[in-house]
Amino acid sequence: MNKLMFRFLYRISHSFPSYIAHGIFISYIALQWFIGQRFFTVSGNTDLHRFFAAFPFAFILYVPLLVSSARIKKQWSFPYSTFEISVSAILSVFCVCLAATFLTMTVPFAICIFGNVEWSQFFCGYLGIILFSFCAVSFSFLVFTLIENTAAAFVTSAICLLACNSIHNIPLYADTGILVSFLIKSISFAWNFDAFAKGILSLKQLIYFLLASVFFIFLTVVKVEGLKGNCNESFRKITRLFLVTFVLLCSACSFINIKIDLTHSRKFSITEYSKKIISNISEPVSITYYLSSSLKNLYPQVKDVSDYLETFSSASDEISFRIVNPSNQDLQKKLEDYGINGQPIRTNSVSSSTVTNVYSAVVIDYLGMTETIPFVLSAATLEFDLAQKINSLIEEKKPLVQIVCANSLSVENDYSYLFPYLKSLGYIPFVSELPSKASVQNKSFSEFTEVPLIVLGCENFTREDTKILEEFLLDGGRAFVATQPYSVNLKDDWSVSQSNNQLYFARMLFTFGIYFKSTMTADISNFRITMVSDSNTNGNAADKKTEYLNYSLWPVLRPQTFAPDGMTTFWPCAFDVDNEVAEMENFYAVPMLATSTAAWQMDKTDGKFITSPFACPAAPEGMEQKGQFNIGAVVAKRDNADDIRLIVFGDQYAFSTPMIAYSSSEAMDFRSLEYLGNSLLLLDGKKELLELKNKATFNHSLYKISETEFPDAVRKTFLVCLLLPMVLIISTGFYFSWRRRILLNEKVDCK
């Protein structure tokens, strides 16, 4: 059998088309990832799901071409059994396929230059490729056995593989019924491979590929034996026994549902919390995903959204799911009635740049009630959104949250992202007033003792307001306080001012063990701001100049428990935690958010804080206090850790519209709002929802490479992932050609 394998391998190694196939296959995998999946753009990430999803379609032409290259005339007349010949040919092609697949590993290793790779997903994905490729080779070999004409066999095999890799999409766009949908997915190679591509080790799919491969080999043997006229009674009995056994194994396999989600955050699995909510569904729930076809090309990650929605809906017979392309005006008008508007996406071509409105929205219907997810591009927090929205439909109520804006800004104009974000969390937000400004129409926050409170700034708090807030907290109220004991003029020169009201408010927090420092917090880990000038020192017009400055007073926090992606802060004030004082009121404070260890405290100079980006020191210059500092803390009752009364965050500007806009690039930076959401859920006692919200916390961003290093890293990536495999393939081709020439010369010499 080894001699047979070498014979087939020799045939493939001396086939020029096979080398072309290797080059195209490897190039397609690399280019599909880096270009097709827009890896080098703002939407790029290191999640390997879409990388592995390209393999089934790459195999459509690659595998039939390899099988045709291995074909030998009169191979069935070799002095071996039909089974040995079939297995040898299949294993030979499979080994060559594995060698080419091995060269594609340069892509995941190159990705490591830009960010983190989930190695469990890497292992699972390549295991799936091994199983898929063996099955595809077995199937293609069967087709080439059934059809003698090589060209016809190639075309037929490619068409069949294309159908097997695409047919599973039919139930998403047409109502096929449960039975037909099951049968369609059963014959789809790509659908069964997708679990491995996501990082899920599925025993059912593993057995599926093994059984399918054995079945194709068996059909090949039956076909050849029939052509040879060897179908005697004994052979027919063995055939019937095999078919009965195969059917029984397939039936048994359908009941196996052992899956291990190997992804870092188990992001493709449904949590017990969601299952508990789903179990409470008593009437049909309809989930409709409105997805613009153009968005699939711009943001390939939306495929994960549809995949997870399908997984979620399969958890209950009461949940139905469908995908709709809102391409006509009637559907778009319907979405507008739901409060869903198209999002403008800019697309660039060689000659023009256009803005297109696209949709990626989820609408959930239950008993005539509707909940929506207006825009979703990834599955990162999708389970959280689905769980809390379905739960609100079942319970027919939503929680409230009140907001007091006690600085010179306004919620409507300067915190414009706050209301939409809180609504997306499932809350109904409303603005309440300070007691000193309350009226019949605008009630004081103290009247809503059961509703959690968000406080933004403290300069407008009178002493009486501060006392009422303290009583509110001591009597069982809950508040998230975002403030510094000073104010920054956002709309002018960033100058800092401080009032007695702010100092008194800061002293009130002593009750809860929070001691604000009298300094500003700076950090080596900070935001790089862009300063543009189009005039000279005299104020006259000049050529535009751009300068990039590392602004130490805008510390960038590293990922931590309640800010899993980190966040940018703006002129924050650090504080100390003293539980000896907090214990006097039976409270206990715990730090929850901190700077890097390279932070320091900046004192006033001549009675003022220096905030100018050009004058602000980029590093500590003298005897400043250095180290890691708290800028966030949670305060709970000492005898009941779940009774959280207060969360303090030393930054009132992180949620403001101008600061979010300034710190954002092509994509909006809402990490500060995510921290607020995490804090609110913690304050509201919704720990299960909080865990669900932060379920997918693996950092898939391209954070390892700076903007200046990026172009050089891209060039090196293409060299490693494209040029290196091509050099190896060409070198291998020349080597076998050289070896063949030597052997031919030796034969000539012998004659």
Image: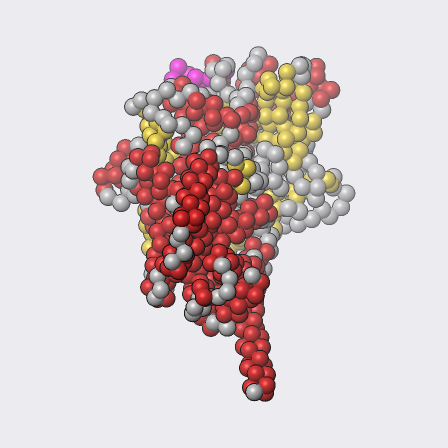
312 inside magenta stretch: no
Please say whether residue 55 is visible from this viewpoint.
no
Q: Nearer the viewer, residue 551 or 668?
A: 668
Which corner quadrant of the image does residue 319 belong to? top left
751 with respect to 300 (left or right) = right
* Majority SS type along the magenta span: loop
Q: Nearer the viewer, residue 384 or 704?
A: 384
Q: Nearer the viewer, residue 662 or 38?
A: 38
Task: Look at the picture and state if 547 lies above or below 281.
Answer: below
Which corner quadrant of the image does residue 229 belong to? bottom left
Q: Which residues are magenta?
A: 437-446
48 with respect to 420 (left or right) = right
Most distant residue in the right direction: 623
Q: Position of residue 417 (x, y in %)?
A: 44, 35
Identify the residue at image location x=56%, y=40%.
Answer: 262
Q: Position of residue 318 (x, y in %)?
A: 36, 26
Q: Position of residue 474 (x, y in %)?
A: 60, 14
Identify the residue at image location x=35%, y=64%.
Answer: 148
Identify the residue at image location x=61%, y=34%.
Answer: 561
